[in-house]
């Protein structure tokens, strides 16, 4: 994961004081371009990582050969742990590295840093092809999660008029560049898509968070519930093997390879919430996709085909 590399990059810079993108690429077995992007990502996130051009130059942490993080200020510490924290939920080495970094911070910053490390989870598994621009409210909500401040949201669900919600923000998750806020309300735990939040007001009231709340576990439950809703109907489809990667990208988790039919054809299973929704998603493939079952999806495709012929047949 990228967050693992960022942790390793910071630890390497602590040990050496200054590194070049080439040295970093060699140590972490990545390309020089990837190493340079990681260094630039740390710098743009507000973490004091600076380039020094010219002979004998490179990238330095805190402007010099420091072996600790005592030069970080509070906002820089939060930015650092927001950036690298998600790796700790899935990688034991990253979790160990984070503990070392926390101990290297000034004591007054540690609580905020730990809160930031636990504020975000990144889900690398796609749900589909959608990859929109992130909402401009993400940073504001992340800050409210870290500072444990209650927020007032104006939220526009896809099938309802916008309403105002008072939420205790517990954590955030990112998937396909779509951000979700998980929080507590008077009605219990709720999940909000951030791109449907039209306004945010951070209050001065302290947010309440259950002592046993674990963001990764909570997000897994949310994903499980959504998967169940999205996978109401599965279809068995035969496609040219060359199209399998594109179909997997389109359907994300609702895609499973069933078997190879012959040298150039693959049988796959895809799913959606209803037969009608699934048929509309498959219809765009035309003759490239042959649905074998169920009959409900085949009937929906026949209806779509008849409608298209009636409109465009001439």
Image (cartoon, rainbow, N blue to C red):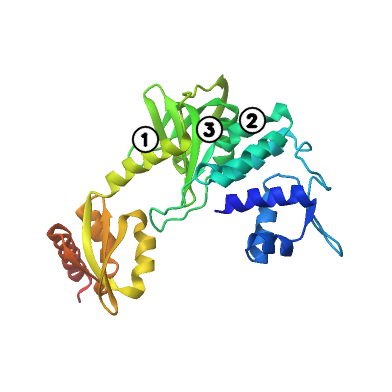
* Above/below status of 312 relative to 236: below
Q: Where in the figure is residue 132, as x and y percent of width and height?
A: 48, 53
The Cα–Cα distance between marks 2 and 1, rounded to whole angstroms, is: 36 Å
Left or right: residue 63 compared with residue 185: right
Q: Quick one: label 3, few (<14), some, or many (20+) residues within 10 Å?
A: some
Q: To which quarter of the image does residue 191 belong? A: top left
Instruction: Compare marks 3 and 1 and give the one earlier in the sequence.
Output: 1
Image quadrant occupied by the C terminus: bottom left
Left or right: residue 141 compared with residue 271: right
Q: Quick one: label 2, few (<14), some, or many (20+) residues within 10 Å?
A: some
Tell me the mark number nearer the camera, choosing from 3 and 1: 3
The Cα–Cα distance between marks 2 and 3, rounded to whole angstroms, is: 22 Å
* Element under disc 2: helix
Label 3 sits on residue: 200
Q: Residue at x 37, y 43 (%)?
A: 223
Instruction: Compare marks 2 and 1 and give the one earlier in the sequence.
Output: 2
**Image mark for residue 135:** none
Tell me the mark number nearer the camera, choosing from 2 and 1: 2
Q: Where in the figure is residue 161, as x and y percent of width and height?
A: 36, 35
Label 2 sits on residue: 112
Circles 3 and 1: CB distance less than 8 Å? no
Circles 2 and 1: CB distance less than 8 Å? no
Q: How many marks?
A: 3
* Element under disc 1: loop
Label 1 sits on residue: 161
Q: Is residue 137 visible?
A: no
Q: Residue at x 31, y 55 (%)?
A: 254
* Element under disc 3: strand
Q: Is residue 287 visible?
A: yes
Circles 2 and 3: CB distance less than 8 Å? no
Instruction: Compare marks 2 and 3 and give the one earlier in the sequence.
Output: 2
């Amino acid at each position: 994961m990228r967050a693992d590399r960022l942790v390793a990059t910071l630890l390497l810079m602590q040990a050496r004081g200054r590194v070049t993108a080439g040295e970093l690429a060699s140590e972490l077995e990545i390309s020089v371009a990837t190493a340079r992007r990681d260094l630039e990502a740390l710098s743009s996130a507000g973490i004091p990582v600076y380039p020094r051009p010219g002979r004998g130059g490179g990238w330095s942490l805190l402007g010099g050969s420091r072996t600790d993080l005592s030069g970080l200020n509070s906002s820089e510490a939060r930015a650092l742990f927001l950036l690298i924290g998600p790796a700790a939920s899935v990688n034991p080495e990253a979790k160990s590295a984070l503990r070392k970094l926390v101990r290297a911070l000034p004591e007054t910053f540690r609580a905020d840093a730990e809160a930031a490390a636990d504020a975000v989870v990144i889900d690398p598994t796609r749900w589909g092809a959608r990859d929109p621009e992130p909402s401009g409210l993400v940073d504001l909500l992340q800050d409210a999660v870290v500072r444990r401040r209650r927020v007032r949201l104006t939220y526009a669900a896809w099938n309802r008029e916008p309403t105002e919600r008072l939420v205790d923000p517990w954590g955030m998750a990112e998937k396909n560049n779509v951000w979700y806020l998980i929080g507590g309300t008077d009605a219990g735990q709720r999940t909000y898509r951030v791109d449907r939040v039209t306004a945010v007001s951070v209050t001065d009231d302290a947010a309440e968070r259950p002592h046993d709340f674990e963001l990764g576990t909570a997000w897994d439950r949310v994903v499980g519930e959504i998967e169940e809703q999205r996978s109401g109907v599965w279809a068995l489809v035969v496609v040219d093997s060359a199209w399998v990667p594109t179909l997997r990208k389109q359907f994300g988790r609702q895609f499973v390879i069933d078997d190879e039919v012959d040298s150039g054809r693959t049988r796959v299973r895809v799913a959606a919430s209803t037969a009608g929704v699934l048929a509309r998603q498959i219809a765009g493939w035309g003759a490239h996709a042959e649905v074998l079952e169920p009959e409900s999806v085949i009937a929906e495709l026949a209806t779509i085909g008849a409608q298209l012929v009636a409109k465009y047949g001439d």
